Amino acid sequence: MTKRPLLFLTLAALLLLTTVPASAAIILSSPAARAEVGAPLQLLLTITNDRSEPLSIDIPAPLHVRFETAKGIATLDLTPDASGPLVIAPHEFLSIQLTGVVPTGAEGVATIATTGLESNLVALQLDATKPATVTRDVDAATKAEVANNDSLLIDKPPPLPVSVYEPVYFLIGGDGGLNAKFQISFRYRLFDDKGALASRLPWIDDLYLSFSQTSLWDLGELSKPFKDTSYRPRLFFANYDLGRLLDGRLRLGIEGGAGHESNGKEGDASRSFNMFYARPTLTFGDPEGLRAYLAPLIHNYVAADENPDLADYRGYVDWLVGIGSKGGLDFWATLRKGQRSNFGSVELNLSYPLSKLSGGDLTGWLLLQYFGGYGESLLDYNRKLDSQLRLGIGVAL
């Protein structure tokens, strides 16, 4: 096929995509904001057709919904009053009544969503009910379902106490030879915020252990050796929402504790130190949306006998500053100023969600990183090497 017909086919395909009618909207709703535990459950499924042509949709019977509370989860079978292949006329809608039973082991607030159809979530406040009220004014089938639904609700596992701490990424660059830089980082919350100890000492659920690892990988050499790796375990307290000012737009927080950093080598290549640190945090805007933030890490050097001049090149503050949105373009920088002369470093990062670049097919972020100055690795803390520009994928930022 020549290039010109291929171009025409591509343009035709794009034109076709832009003229595809809007898909149907599926809305799940409840006639009441509350429901009784163990009692009949009624929901309404509304399907709208905004197309200029009839819409065919298949409604299964029973229709499965995901029923979730803070402590339990279940898959409920709801009976629709209309099922099978259905046709909705252009610019019309179809309402389907769904009936079932609220699991008797449920409590608190429940969220409900269909599992076979893409719909919204519905939240219901659950009220306790007496056994005598469970079977009032319902048919025999519903009575049997109420009597046997005690085992529907399965206990949810406790929330995972592990989360991302520093950005996780893999980057490749070519300055000074083909090389890669990658970082993994996670933190572990020591105490359960629902536990008895945390109920007496509320601050204790803000204690964390973390581990971060940053590696420089020389891809230009035949054996592809790792040039250096920095290992950074920490024990710290962190509360990033201690106070709010300016109608909640400005948030103040703190992180502080003890840390260790080393490169795991021996002899003349060994680098390590311990530290105590504090990191005040200021976030202006929406923490999960458009925001600006400042989080300087202020620290000292303890037991740095192998490299006592670390402060000359790294200083006592890692200045972290950023602006942007995790849902869009995001920029942040880490700056260090040594105690002597013009020693120091700058690391600049720019990220953008891959989902927006790929039409929703990819996860993570496209990440561009620049580093210039002294000590990209702990091994070379007192050496100024070639500046590096790397591009890659951010797994978690």
Image (cartoon, grey):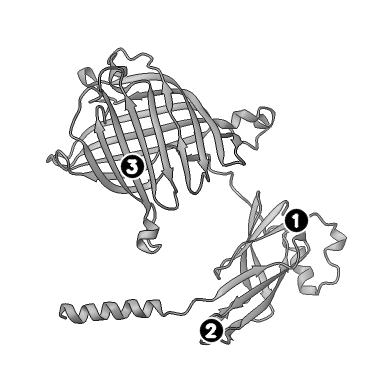
Circle nearer the viewer, 3 or 1: 3
Cα separation between marks 2 and 1? 35 Å
Label 3 or label 1, whichever comes before in sequence order: 1
Cα separation between marks 3 and 2? 48 Å
Q: How many marks?
A: 3
Residue 279 makes an appearance in the image: yes
Percent x, y of residue 260: 39, 23
The residue where tag 2 is placed is: 56
- As shown in the figure, which amino acid type bears the numbered disc 3? Asn
- As shown in the figure, which amino acid type bears the numbered disc 2? Ser
For the point 29% across and 13% down, which residue is it? 308
| Residue at disc 3, secondary structure | strand
For the point 45% across and 48% down, which residue is it? 325
* Residue that lies at the very extreme toward the right in this rendered image: 132
Quadrant of the image containing the C terminus: top left
Residue 369 sits above or below residue 78 on the image = above
The residue where tag 3 is placed is: 349
